[in-house]
Amino acid sequence: MRVIAGKARRLPLKTVPGKDTRPTTDRIKETLFNILQNEVGGIRFLDLFSGSGGIGIEALSRGAKYACFVESSRAAAECIRENLAFTHLSEQADVMQCDVLAALLRLEGQEPFQIVFMDPPYKSALERTVLEEIARRRPSFVSPETLIITEADIRNDFSYVEALGYEILREKTYKTNKHVFLRLTKEEA
């Protein structure tokens, strides 16, 4: 795994040993950031279920001004910190080692993130839990302009999101997984 583009381009990233994390492949990461290329510069980026931090680090490398990484695993959080130090991006980032729902409470009161990315464990239904919590609470760090991207198994059904107050903007499918791009509907916000 490596940084694809930007100021940390080509730098290798550590991954967490074992099967508890599933890093996004370089090819899928490159496709995702080709879609986001005009939206990353100067933004605040929230990376939920961060794993080794590859997505948030890619955002920082490509010009995001700040990234917050949320990861419950101690080993994964340490891996993120090491990757941030190695890529010289630590000054622009915070790592929260805690449960994602606890992090959402701790982030309340912060200015909005322009992009929220989440890659929960497949078949956990945690993306639904997070989307329900955000829709229910309407926290300060998510605005109607915030782009929420969920990486999920290709078979995951997102038909429930409209009832929660989200609009699906785009869905990009790959061989075994997909990215679903969402926004809270303005009339609901």
Image: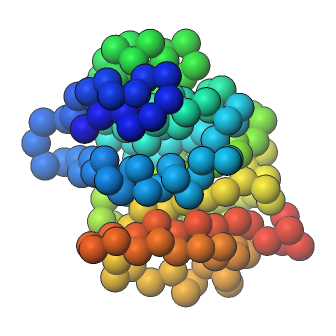
Residue 151, compared with residue 139, is above or below; it is: below
Q: Residue 161: tell me if it is visible.
A: yes
> Horizontally, is 15 left or right of 49 in the view?
left
- Percent position of residue 179, x then y: 46, 66
Between residues 159 and 24, which one lies in front from this camera angle? 24
Q: What residue is rendered at 58% in x and 66% in y?
A: 181
Q: What residue is rendered at 40% in x and 70% in y?
A: 178
> Horizontally, is 17 left or right of 33 in the view?
left
Between residues 32 and 158, which one lies in front from this camera angle? 32
Q: Residue 80: tell me if it is visible.
A: no
Q: In the displayed orientation, state which residue is furthest to the right.
A: 187
Q: Where on the picture, by quarter, is residue 184? A: bottom right
Q: In the displayed orientation, state which residue is furthest to the left.
A: 18
> Horizontally, is 8 left or right of 130 in the view?
left
> Horizontally, is 158 left or right of 14 in the view?
right
Residue 167, compared with residue 57, is above or below; it is: below
Between residues 99 and 31, which one lies in front from this camera angle? 31
Quick one: quadrant of the C terminus?
bottom right
- Percent position of residue 25, x then y: 28, 51
Residue 59, compared with residue 24, is above or below; it is: above
Q: What residue is rendered at 47% in x and 55% in y?
A: 32
- Percent position of residue 174, x then y: 34, 71
Q: What residue is rendered at 64% in x and 41% in y?
A: 40
Quick one: quadrant of the N terminus?
top left
**How many numbered marks have been drawn onto this rendered protein structure?**
0
